[in-house]
Image (spheres, helix red, strand yellow):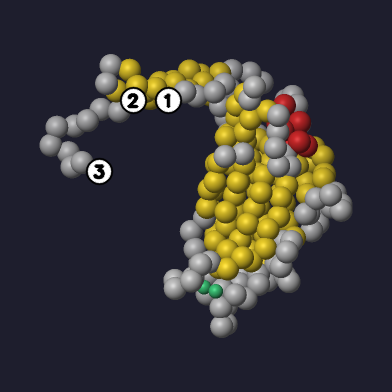
Amino acid sequence: MESVIGLLRVRIIRGVNLAVRDTRGSDPYVVLRLGGQKLKTSTIKNNVNPEWNEDLTLSVSEPLQPIKLQIFDKDTFSSDDEMGDAEFDIYSFVDAVRMDLTGIPNGTIITTVKPSRENCLAVESPILKKDGRVIQDLVLRLRNVESGEVELQLSWNCLAVESPIIEKDGKVIQGLILRLRNVESGEVGLQLSWVNIPGAPDF
Ligand SMILES: [Ca+2]
Ligand SMILES: [Ca+2]
């Protein structure tokens, strides 16, 4: 039985020295997979050192599974070319998220994941407290390709419990309980709903 424990924000920062899959460059985009979820970034044209700075949000369940990353070269008249892949786990990150970090100053490194044969890390990956939250910086070395690294940053959102989106009385409603940051305790419950304004354009 799976249970959702939170939402993981994966910031895809940049790719470095990615493989060439066209005559000159490549048009790279990143695909992330976790369980049945699949998310992708936009495509950056003709650049093997692309800067995406895009956030992709995955719903994380236990038992924890590894997150798979692939890069492709977008092609118009043929199927997209593979530019390597990598995977990473979030055990240490989730452990850090669950710690009580009250009183720990911003900038403190909570733990560091070291590169090994079992992971795709190119360099040591610090997990630290920053702006009252836990983040992890990762540099992944791509496999199954001649070159390329990808830089990512993980962070956890503030949901204290699962946030269901439901339909009630013909309206879509989302209930949220937010855990407050930068303070020793406190949660706030909110409910979002949508109101249609007569005469507003449909979208
Ligand atoms: Ca190509
Ligand atoms: Ca291409």
Pointer 1 residue: 165
Residue 203 shows which numbered tag? 3
Answer with the quarter of the image where residue 37 lies.
top right
List x then y, in percent, for residue 97. Answer: 70, 31
Dot placed on the residue nearer the N-terminal end, 2 or 1: 1
Could you tell me residue 78's position as x and y percent? 48, 71
Residue 182 visible in the displayed image: no
Q: Seen in the image, is 152 located left or right of residue 193?
A: right
Q: Of residues 135 and 74, which is closer to you in this image?
A: 74
Tell me which amino acid carries mark 1. Answer: Ile
- At x 58%, y 63%, the residue is 72
**Number of the label disc, if any, that sits on residue 94:** none
Q: Residue 98 lies in what quarter of the image? A: top right
Figure quadrant of the N terminus:
top right
Image coordinates for residue 178, horizontal then vertical, percent: 53, 24
Q: Give the camera-side residue of 121 and 38.
A: 38
Instruction: Check mark 2 vs ligand 2: CB closer than 8 Å? yes or no.
Output: no
Residue beneath disc 2:
172
- How many tags in the picture? 3
Circle 2/circle 1 CB separation < 8 Å: yes
Q: Residue at x 64, y 66 (%)?
A: 83
**Tag 1 secondary structure:** strand
Residue 81: x %, y % from top left = 58, 68
Whole-Å distance between the Cαs marked 2 and 1? 7 Å
> Mark 1 packing: few (<14 Cα in 10 Å), some, or many (20+)?
some
- The Cα atoms of the two marked residues, 1 and 3, are separated by 20 Å
Badge 3 element:
loop
